[in-house]
Image (cartoon, helix red, strand yellow):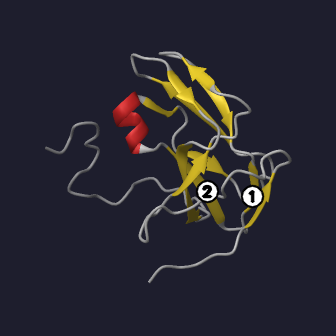
């Protein structure tokens, strides 16, 4: 069963023509976000740029929005997000921006309305730390990077 949540969203002035974030399939976890660039924006290989979305949201307390890359852009063009997943906190009311980077070998053109990232809304758990001298043992223990085969 999928939980449904009502979230307020605001289209920023000049961006009323762009679609709201949306699920592309019935069981998609992420909603696609579109570029709200005024004109075509070229990302040269190795270049990063803040791409506006033209929207701001008001998440309820206890939720966050995670901003993630689109796998198709990464595979086909080498374009992804630098801070991934990016976090939109429940108390943030500014425009959602996307830090795109071109890891590909060719320039990438960002066009207005193009789907360039995705957003997943998740519950947030607040942690209360309990200091101790010894942690409970596990089979893995302190095995870190590359520990499992």
Image depth: mark 2 or mark 1 in front? 1
Q: Which is more toward the observer, 89 or 12?
A: 12
Image point (39%, 43%), residue name: 71
Which residue corresponds to the image point at 51% horizontal and 40% vertical from the top-left? 84
Query: Measured from the top left, where is residue 147 in percent x and y?
Result: 20, 41
Report whether 92 appears left or right of 6.
right
In this picture, residue 133 sits left or right of residue 145: right
> Residue 98 placed where, x, y %?
62, 38
Quadrant where the C terminus sits is: top left
Q: Is residue 56 left or right of residue 140?
A: right
> Tag 1, which secondary structure?
strand
Question: Which residue is labeled 1 in the image?
Answer: 57
Q: Which x, y percent locates residue 131?
A: 54, 56
Q: Residue furthest left?
A: 149
* Residue 65: mark: 2
Q: Dot 1: within a 10 Å radius of its alpha carbon, few (fewer than 14), some, or many (20 or more) residues?
A: many
Residue plotted at (77% across, 45% down): 95
Task: Using the image, determine if residue 22 lies above or below residue 27.
Answer: above
Tell me the quarter of the image containing the N terminus.
Answer: bottom left
Foreground of the two, 134 or 110: 110
Which quadrant of the view contains residue 144? top left
The image quadrant that residue 21 belongs to is bottom right
Residue 119 lies, in percent from the top left, at 56, 54
Alpha carbon separation for disc pair 2 and 1: 9 Å
Q: Is residue 40 above or below residue 72?
A: above
Give the residue furthest to the right: 13
What is the secondary structure assignment of the residue under circle 2?
A: strand
Q: Which of disc 1 and disc 2 is earlier in sequence?
A: 1
Question: Which residue extends farthest bottom?
Answer: 1
CB contact under 8 Å: marks 2 and 1: yes
Residue 129 versus residue 29: which sits nearer the camera?
Answer: 29
């Amino acid at each position: 069963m999928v939980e449904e949540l009502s979230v307020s969203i605001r289209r920023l002035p000049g961006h009323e023509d762009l679609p709201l974030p949306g699920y592309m399939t019935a069981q998609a976890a992420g909603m696609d976000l579109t570029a709200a660039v005024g004109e075509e924006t070229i990302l040269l290989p190795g270049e990063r740029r803040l791409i506006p979305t033209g929207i701001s949201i008001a998440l309820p307390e206890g939720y966050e929005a995670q901003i993630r890359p689109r796998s198709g852009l990464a595979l086909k063009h080498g374009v992804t997000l630098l801070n991934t997943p990016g976090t939109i906190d429940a108390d943030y009311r500014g425009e959602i921006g996307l830090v795109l980077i071109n890891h590909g070998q060719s320039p990438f053109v960002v066009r207005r309305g193009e789907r360039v990232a995705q957003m997943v809304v998740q519950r947030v758990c607040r942690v209360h730390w309990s200091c101790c001298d010894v942690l409970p043992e596990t089979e893995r223990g302190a095995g870190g990077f590359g520990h499992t085969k």
